[in-house]
Amino acid sequence: MIGKHFFSETDIKSTWEQVLTAFWQRYPNPYSTHVLTEDVLFREVTSDNLLLSRRLLTKTNRLPRWAERIFPGKRSVYIIEDSVVDLGNRSLTTLTWNVNHAKLMTLQTDINIRECSADMIVSIMSVVLQEFGLARFRSNQVKSMKGLEHALSNLQKASAVCPGDSAEKHKNTNSASKTQKPQQYI
């Protein structure tokens, strides 16, 4: 089979902690209504302080009109997402793939989120086996980034300065938090 490749890199102007938190809170969001469920199947913290997770996502997408005649009804796709959070290197790596409909099309997505200076770089590399799947993936990747930005916006609104707080107090809080190590929860 011939593979199709799609690569996207995005620079996100948020802290590592905010991006990591938003990644886990990105569903539901108004841009990814095709994601129906997300369930944690397995989660473990290893002896070298890596967080390993396996999740099952249920998604639905419309087929092209010609295919709807052949395969009537709604189609749910089950996606496995394996992820590794490395707190020491401040990185998140995920690998996702479809479990069902694999004879028709296999979609594999690799996402690497890592801290780069003060900014975050999100690298997405995908292998798609059909043109329609590639076009759909491109469309959904844009929605996925909008969903992540939506979750980040909600987090930033929640941590905004409360009315009545002085700008100096907020500035001191921000500078103190930049010098402290983040707490690790296990």
Image (tube, rainbow, N blue to C red):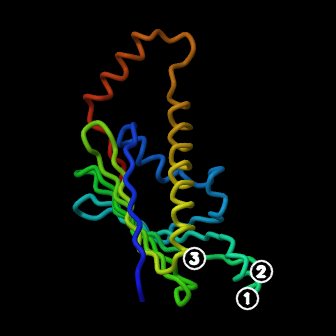
Name the residue tied to disc 1: 70
Q: Residue at x 39, y 10 (%)?
A: 168
Mark 2 crowd level (few <14, some 14–19, many ≥20, 10 Å Cα): few
Q: Residue at x 24, y 63 (%)?
A: 47
Q: Residue at x 34, y 58 (%)?
A: 112
Left or right: 17 as drawn, with respect to 137: left
Tags 2 and 1 in contact by the CB under 8 Å rule? no
Tell me the distance, in whole angstroms, between the alpha carbons under discs 3 and 2. 16 Å
Mark 1: amino acid: Ile
Instruction: Please state the horizontal and vertical placement of residue 39, each as a whole percent of the image.
Output: 56, 67
Residue 161 drawn above or below residue 77: above
Residue 162 drawn above or below residue 126: above
Instruction: Please state the horizontal and vertical placement of residue 76, each as a whole percent of the image.
Output: 66, 76
Q: Quadrant of residue 69?
A: bottom right
Left or right: 116 as drawn, with respect to 149: left
2 or 1: mark nearer the eye: 1
3 or 2: mark nearer the eye: 2
Name the residue tied to disc 3: 78
Residue 21 drawn above or below residue 2: above
Secondary structure at badge 2 equals loop
Query: Total marks drawn?
Result: 3
The mark found on residue 137 in the picture is none
Name the residue tied to disc 2: 73
Instruction: Please state the horizontal and vertical placement of residue 44, each as a whole percent of the image.
Output: 37, 65
Lower sequence index among marks 1 and 3: 1
Tell me the distance, in whole angstroms, between the alpha carbons under discs 2 and 1. 10 Å
Mark 3 crowd level (few <14, some 14–19, many ≥20, 10 Å Cα): some
Residue 160 drawn above or below residue 98: above
Q: Residue at x 51, y 79 (%)?
A: 130
